[in-house]
Image (spheres, rainbow, N blue to C red):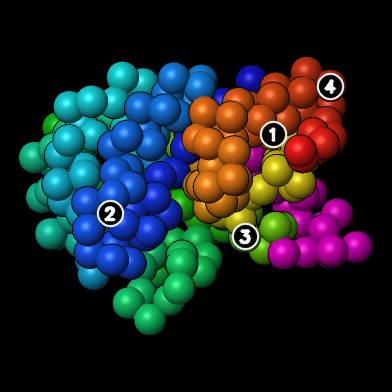
Amino acid sequence: MARLQVNIDHVATVRQARRTVEPDPVHAAVLAELAGATGITVHLREDRRHIQDRDVEILRRTVRTRLNLEMAASDEMVAIARRIRPDMCTLVPERREELTTEGGLDVVTHREAVARAVRALAADGIEVSLFVDARVPQLDVAKLVGAHAVELHTGTYAHATGAALEREIELLRAGAARAQAQGLVVHAGHGLTYWNTAAVAAISAMCDLNIGHSIVSRAVLVGMERAVREMIAIIDAATVGGRGAPLPMA
């Protein structure tokens, strides 16, 4: 049954716009957990554009569910993760020029660097997930480098329409089945909203959905707890009833 992990990066984005102390992503994490989220996700980027080291350190002491740290497979980030010890690290591609993560990590091309990061994190008991496109070569190498899980990139699906939308959801279903058959735990995320999450949540192999921007955007209007509960309701309905349907938004 699919579960919700809330990415709180964009709470920090609002804070950093004024270089002040509010809103505090730590407070947002508490509210998300109280509303039923089963995990909190943050991306500590090299340029520190939103989440700061301080945030991750405090979240490690306060999160009561699971803390998932998204990060590049760099020596700096591996060292930080080994010191802070999140429950899971998700290795993602990262470019300074990008507005947000633009696609899956190319595990095939960067196999040695990814394998080195996975080994170092696993040595400290940290589960490692790889953020990848739902393509067979990437999924197969993810298993070979020792990943515990994969997070399927849903950005292309989120922007697709018509026949392309159906093709993308089929690719996600096939990728999830392939990963599960190899013993990998299956997550998904990027671009998921209140209107397109149901079909992804309905994939039988799906475990955790990482959703951030849409929930934070909704929370600005109705509050974090309500925004999280509404998303959980969509995920639960999709898991029980097949494809599910978006809830009416008041």
Instruction: Of the two numbered discs 2 and 4 on the same chain, state the one appearing first in sequence.
Output: 2
Disc nearer the start of the sequence (2/3): 2
Viewport quadrant of the C terminus: top right
CA gap between label 4 and label 1 equals 11 Å
Q: Residue at x 28, y 54 (%)?
A: 51
Please name which of the two marks, 2 or 4, marks the residue nearer to the observer.
2
Q: Main secondary structure of the magenta part?
A: helix
The residue mark sitting in front, 2 or 3, is 2
Find the distance from the CA under tag 3 to the CA under tag 1: 15 Å
Q: Amino acid at mark 4?
A: Gly
Query: Which amino acid lies under the numbered mark 1 shown in the image of this protein?
Result: Ala
- Where 233 sits versus 201, above or below? above
User: To which quarter of the image does residue 28 belong?
Assistant: top left
Q: Earlier in the sequence, mark 1 or mark 2?
A: 2
What is the span of residues highlighted in magenta in the rendered image? 159-182
Amino acid type assigned to the residue bearing label 3 in the image: Gly
Is residue 186 visible to the viewer in this orientation of the structure? no
Nearer to me, 250 or 4: 250
Q: Position of residue 126 (x, y in %)?
A: 24, 33
Looking at the image, do the residues carrying marks 2 and 4 touch, with CB atoms under 8 Å apart? no
The residue labelled by disc 3 is 155
Instruction: Check whether the beta carbons of the residues at disc 3 and disc 1 lie within 8 A of each other.
Output: no
Disc 1: which residue = 201
Q: CA distance from mark 2 to mark 3?
A: 21 Å
Q: Secondary structure at mark 3?
A: helix
Label 3 CA crowd tier, 10 Å (few <14, some 14–19, many 20+)? some
Identify the secondary structure beneath mark 1.
helix
Query: Hey, what amino acid is under mark 2?
Result: Ile
